Amino acid sequence: MADDIRDMSFETALAELEKVVNQLDSGDVPLENSIRLYERGAALKAHCDAKLKDAEEKVAQITLDAKGQPTGTTPAEGM
């Protein structure tokens, strides 16, 4: 993955991925550029997937006692 992508926030990478998809969807991009755009899009998608996975792992559900008071946290379902 390119260094510039590794340093991107999720939001920045997603915005760039959307631009790449729009360019490819337009059909106005020469073949060689399409290949480069596709490769960059794949790298951006992988980066976004990794960022989402990291965020999911940090999410926890607050557990409450019978009185509704927080007693701690447990991993989110599916984790």
Image: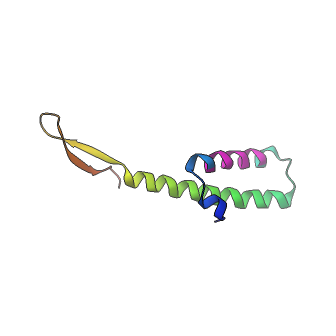
Residue 57 in the image, given as x and y percentages of width and height: 39, 55
- Name which residue lies at 14% across and 40% down: 65
- In the image, taking residue 31 as reference, residue 49 lies left or right, namely left
Q: Quadrant of the N terminus?
A: bottom right
Q: Main secondary structure of the magenta part?
A: helix
Q: Judge whether residue 11 is colored magenta.
A: no
Which part of the image, by quadrant, shows the C terminus?
A: bottom left
Q: In the shown orientation, is residue 66 left or right of residue 50?
A: left
Number of numbered discs visible in the structure rendering: 0
**Compared with residue 17, is residue 5 higher up or lower down, i.e. above or below?**
below
Residue at figure coordinates x 64%, y 59% from the top left: 5
What residue is drawn where x is 81% and y is 44%? 26
- Outermost residue on the left side: it is 66
Quarter residue 18 falls in: top right
Is 25 placed left or right of 74 in the picture? right
Q: Residue at x 17, y 34 (%)?
A: 68
Q: Position of residue 19 (x, y in %)?
A: 72, 45
From the viewer's perspective, is 27 left or right of 2? right
How are the colours assigned in the image? rainbow
Range covered by the magenta-colored residues:
13-23
Residue 45, above or below 18: below
Q: Position of residue 28 (x, y in %)?
A: 86, 47
Residue 54 in picture, x, y percent from top left: 45, 56
